[in-house]
Each structure stands twice: as structure tokens, then as C-alpha cells.
Image: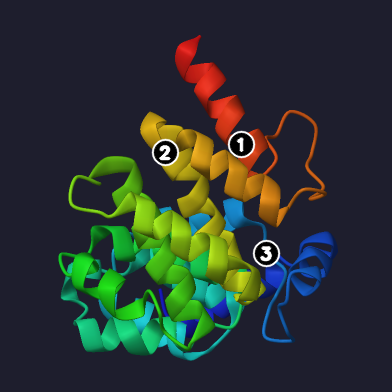
Amino acid sequence: MTLNDIFAQFKSLHNEKVAAHNVKYGAGDNQFGVKLGDIRKLAAQIKTNHALALELWQTQYVEAQLLACLIVKPKELSTQELDALVKSIVFVHVADWFNAYVLKEHPEKERLREQWLHSENKWAARSGWSLMAGRIAKKADDLDLAGLLNYLETEMPKAAPEVQWTMNTALAYIGIHHPAYRQRALEIGEKLGIYRDFPVSKGCTSPFAPIWINEMVRRQEK
């Protein structure tokens, strides 16, 4: 399947509600308004195609970059290429798929975490904190969690909204996965109040850290 074939498919799959949703969350004109499920189906047809993924990414279209995240070979990307890719992101949904499907599979993700954590580029910093949240949840033995909590308390309110989201995930994960630091995480969440009034759909958990932490702990204990 060629780039032209894929773009023809995107045009045929246009959905006005999806396009409006994308605009609401920061997408520009470079989009077709395609449902995520349809992009996944297309990726299943194409399977892995590293060269095509890079070609898709360069178009800067939302759907093309989302599809690229699903068909690229993460381990064939150098750290320099990943750095360039993350800093070319302009839409939050692309950032999250990049973090979920590309970064977490890369053997140099620890080096990238350290490199991006305090980056001035908001998308690199978002990815750095996403990687940090993953470390907190799965392999935190060598992390200074007390120091991280102090940093989040001071710096999270000043961060760009795109970075705040994954910093907040790191805060919640400390509270969820590390009981010794749970009360401190809850106190910071209450003090900062970030996402306190965030609208959530019925049945979904609020991203407000104290609610998130308490709900996840309740489920674990249950």
C-alpha cells in the first residue's frame, strides 16, 4: 500500500465529529477526521512497514502520524531520530500514541527519559514524564521518590499543559504504587488542585490525583 493509497482511504473514512474533536484538542488543518479504530484496522492490513511509517510521519497529518506509530519498527530508530520525531509532534493524541507504541519499545528509553525530562520542548518533556511514570510503576528502586514529589510540587503548576498531564500521571503513580509516599502524593494533589474540576465521562476515573490514587488503591484492596 502506497502513501497515496492510504490518503485515499483516509479521505473515504472522514468523520465530521472526529474532526471537530481533534480541533478541540489542538489539531490544525492537517487532518482527515478518522476514527482511531479505523486507523488500527488499516495498520492491521499494512502490518509493519518502517519505511512507509517514516514517509507517513513526514506528511505531518494527524492520521498519518498515528498510523506511523503502529507500523514503525521502534528498535530501528536511533535516539537522534526519536528526538527529531518527538520534537516534530504538534497534536496531543499523536504524542500519546508515540509514547505508548514507539518509546516504550525502545532499548534506549532510559537515556531518553533522562534527556527529555527537563527539556524546553513541551512534547519531549511530556514524553520524558511519560517514561518516568512508567519507571515509577514498574522499576522505581533507584528513584528518589521524595525528591520527585518535591519537584512535582514546585514545578508542575508552572509546566505547559501538555507536560502537566504526564507529570500528574507520575504524581498519581507514586501514590498508587508506593504506599510509603501515598499521603504526601495526596497532599500535593490537593494543594495544587490540578484537574480538580476536569470533566469525565460516566464510569471513568478523574485525573485529579487524589481521586485517581484513592480509586486505584480501593480497587487493589478489593
Nearer the camera: disc 2 or disc 1:
2
Q: Give whichever of discs 1 and 3 has the lower sequence position.
A: 3
Above or below, 6 relative to 214: below
Q: Give whichever of discs 3 and 2 has the lower sequence position.
A: 3
Residue marked by disc 2: 181
Q: Amino acid at mark 1?
A: Trp
- Indicate left or right for 189 with 80 as reference: right
Circle 3 Cα neighbour tier, 10 Å, few/some/many (<14 / 14–19 / ≥20): many
**Structure colour scheme:** rainbow
Above or below, 110 relative to 2: above
Measure how far apart labels 3 and 2 are at the Cα level. 42 Å
At a point 45% along the width and 43% down the height, the residue shown is 173
At a point 27% along the width and 87% down the height, the residue shown is 81
Nearer the camera: disc 3 or disc 2:
2
Q: Amino acid at mark 2?
A: Tyr
Whether residues under marks 1 and 3 lie with C-beta atoms below 8 angstroms apart, the answer is no
Q: Is residue 16 visible?
A: yes
Residue marked by disc 3: 34
- Indicate left or right for 113 with 141 as reference: right
Q: Secondary structure at mark 2?
A: helix
